[in-house]
Image (cartoon, coloured by chain):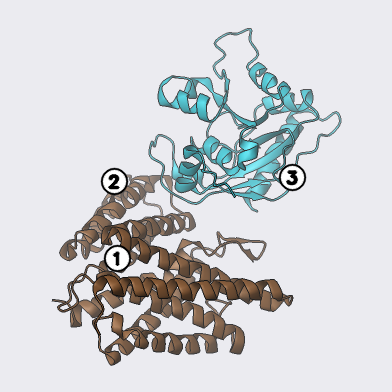
Chain colours: A brown, B cyan
Amino acid sequence: MLLTLHETFFAVLAGLVMLFTVATALGSWLESRTADADKLAWIHQLNLRIRGSWVIVAIFALAFALGGEALTVVFAAASFFALREFVALTPTRGSDYWALVIAFYLAIPLQYVLVAGGLYEWYAVMIPVYLFLLLPMVIALRQDTERYLERVAKVQWGLMISVYCVSHAPAIATLEIPGYEARGALLLLYFLLVLQMNELLAVIASASVGRTPLRSNPSKSVEGVLIGGVAATVVGTLLWWMTPFAWWQSLLMSAAIVVAGFMGGLVLASVKRSLGARDLWLEGGVQLARGALGRLDALAFAAPVFFHLTLFFFAR
Amino acid sequence: MPIKFLPPLVLLARLLVGAYPRWIGTSPTATQRIYFANHSSHIDTLALWAALPGSLRANTRPVAARDYWGKGGIKQRIAEEELNVVMIDRSREDPNADPLDPLRDALKNGFSLIIFPEGTRAPQPLPGPFKGGLYFLAQEFPQVELIPVYLDNLHRSLPKGALLPVPIISTVRFGAPLARAEGESKDAFLSRARAAVIELASG
């Protein structure tokens, strides 16, 4: 039996709410019962991520109620917070002011308007070509050449990661795939679920079998990341029915998302470390929050990869 | 639990510059206080005010220069109706009036104050020399706690001459109350106060 579009959306939404309600209840039950400090630390990490999963439900419910345009607004806000954090970590100077104004007040709205309009020819090149040329011009006009290339490069890097890459997530929902019309939001949900499962399962697996801590992220272990990645790929494969893919194609796509997501975490951890050891969200060694960049690292890398694989093999 | 909405100005400050409070040497309590901070941009007043919890915000008045905030229009409306600022006459239009008098009145009425003892903006990470007002107020109101505050990153958000703030994440660090030393000279007190703010910069 084939469900209508509306029924599919509703069934998936109801399923997710049930799943995350159970997970949240289980998580807080564990947190209230555990006394061991080590265990408590990882349960806390896990609960942070379970709470993050509710964001996916909220995003999806929003898309269900208001349509795809609401999605672009959510991701535009995510880009804003990520870029804000990136700029805070980057030692920008007074003469970078106009470049930053362009990045925040022109690049973000324009990129997402183009994504919402499905204008792939434009949003694919706006930042990597036009702003790539415009920003160094704007900074050069100020005649401040101290560490010029470094400053230009860092603003451009911030834009590419937090705006260009992140904007490919809502773009997934705008892909036109024959036989899969008007179901773009489901494909985006598939992508977000695989990413989130990868994160959740890696944290759980790291806590139970972890021996070798991951250098880029001490709350995970090498074994945990491997097991989590395989498990997330299995979950993704089982979700083939909500995608335009056959089950084996869904397996390969999930694996691509998992690998790209892991690389994103690795790269962003290196970026943060090279921008200075100081972590905005640490206070006396205690993690206060994960921050926008920490939450979006996997998504920023996986979204363009998944977008282009789907575009290349399935769309048009 | 009743849902309380943040005032739009606080929301705006948090959106644009974060203004995350860090209570390092003290905690947010209702004690009468003078918060003194480094001054590097026009958004400092708003950021410090937004970093305070709502219950303290109502009883805390920023001190602001009349020649900048009192020129009418939207700026004055925000200053008077939202921030409840104490206007200080930097240019001494009336040579006989003591510019500190409005501050004394506010302290006598039980308000806490936010002041920027440099007197003017210095778009750099560390504050310049402090002016004397803080010393006189500290002498005249010995029961009021003096809290050093360090605002980071804000000069990068709004450099001198810029109108539109660049979004950034800043923290507002509240230090331990500055102790008063018996018979201390004005200069010694002021440089000690400045050092207390600078010490928070590396925290």
Of residue A18 and residue B120, the one placed in the foreground of this image is A18
Residue furthest front as drawn: A1
Helix, strand or loop under label 1: helix
State whether residue B133 is above or below residue A41.
above
Helix, strand or loop under label 3: loop
Q: Is residue A153 visible?
A: no
State whether residue B35 is above or below residue A28.
above
Count residues near mark 1 (Cα–Cα under 10 Å), then give few for <14, some for 14-19, many for 20+.
many
N-terminal label among 2 and 1: 2
Identity of the amino acid at label 1? Pro
Residue at 22% across, 67% down: A174
Q: Give the residue at mark 3.
A: B176
Of residue B44 and residue A208, the one placed in the foreground of this image is A208
Identity of the amino acid at label 2? Leu
Q: Are marks 2 and 1 on the same chain?
A: yes
Q: Are marks 1 and 3 on the same chain?
A: no
Please give the chain letter of the residue carrying mark 3. B
Q: Residue A156: x and y, percent?
A: 33, 60
Please give the chain letter of the residue carrying mark 1. A
Q: CA distance from mark 1 to mark 3?
A: 47 Å
Q: Give the residue at mark 2.
A: A141
State whether residue A125 is above or below residue A231.
above
Residue at 37% across, 55% down: A148
Q: Give the residue at mark 1.
A: A170
Please give the chain letter of the residue carrying mark 2. A
Identity of the amino acid at label 3? Ala
